[in-house]
Image: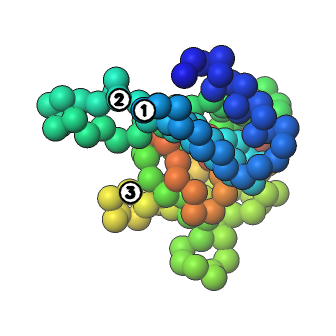
C-alpha cells in the first residue's frame, strides 16, 4: 500500500466522519481511527516490518499523520507529553478535572496525569498563564512529544 493510497483513505475518513476504517490488502493492513474530531491515528501492519530477532513478531507501528497544532498566538506555549502513555484529565474517574480551558495556571500546577507502565505521572505547568486549549481527550493514548495543552503566558 502506497503513502498516496493511505492519504486518500485518511481523506475519505475525514470527509465521511466515520469513526474507524480498517482495510486489508493481502498481508498489508491499515487501520485509521478518528478521535472525536481531535485528530486521527493510522496503524500500519505489514510483513516487511517484522523483526526476525524477535521471532517474526512486530508490534503495530503508529504513524503520526497530523502535526502538532500551531498555537493561535505566537506567544502561546504548547505543553507536550514527556512520555508515552494514557492521558487522564482528573485524579480519578468521576473527580473534577485538574484544569479547564480559561483557568489561570502557575508553575507546578498539575495539568493532567499520564499513566505509563502502571505508574501515574503528573504533568505540571512550567509557566504561568491562561490555559487556552486542551488538545487531548480523556483516556486516550498519547505519544512522546504530542501536544496536550496550549498555555498563553501572562
As drawn, 141 above or below 3: below
**Farthest bottom residue?**
94
Image vertical order of residue 136 relative to residue 55, above or below: below
The answer to whether marks 1 and 2 mark residues whose Cβ atoms lie closer than 8 Å is yes
Give the labeled residue for mark 2: 47
The label shown at residue 27 is 1
Q: How is the image coloured?
A: rainbow
Q: Which is in the foreground here, disc 2 or disc 3?
A: 2
Q: Earlier in the sequence, mark 2 or mark 3?
A: 2
Left or right: residue 113 compared with residue 36: left
Seen at 54% across and 78% down, the residue is 92
Q: Position of residue 57 (x, y in %)?
A: 25, 40
Instruction: Say few, some or many: other residues with alpha carbon within 10 Å of mark 2 (under 14 / 14 to 19 / 20 or more).
Output: few
Q: Quadrant of residue 56?
A: top left
Kindly state the secondary structure of the residue where label 1 is placed. loop
Q: Which mark is residue 116?
A: 3
Q: Quadrant of the N terminus?
A: top right
Amino acid at each position: 500500500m502506497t503513502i498516496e493510497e493511505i492519504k486518500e483513505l485518511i481523506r475519505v475518513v475525514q470527509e465521511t466522519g466515520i469513526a474507524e476504517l480498517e482495510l486489508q490488502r493481502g498481508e498489508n493492513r491499515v487501520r485509521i481511527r478518528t478521535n472525536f474530531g481531535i485528530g486521527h491515528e493510522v496503524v500500519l501492519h505489514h510483513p516487511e516490518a517484522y523483526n526476525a530477532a524477535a521471532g517474526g513478531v512486530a508490534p503495530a507501528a503508529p504513524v503520526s499523520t497530523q502535526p502538532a497544532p500551531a498555537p493561535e498566538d505566537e506567544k502561546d506555549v504548547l505543553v507536550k507529553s514527556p512520555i508515552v502513555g494514557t492521558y487522564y484529565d482528573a485524579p480519578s474517574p468521576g473527580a473534577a478535572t485538574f484544569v479547564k480551558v480559561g483557568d489561570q495556571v502557575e508553575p507546578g500546577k498539575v495539568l493532567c496525569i499520564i499513566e505509563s507502565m502502571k505508574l501515574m505521572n503528573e504533568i505540571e505547568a512550567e509557566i504561568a498563564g491562561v490555559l487556552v486549549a486542551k488538545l487531548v481527550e480523556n483516556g486516550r493514548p498519547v505519544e512522546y512529544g504530542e501536544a496536550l495543552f496550549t498555555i498563553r503566558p501572562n
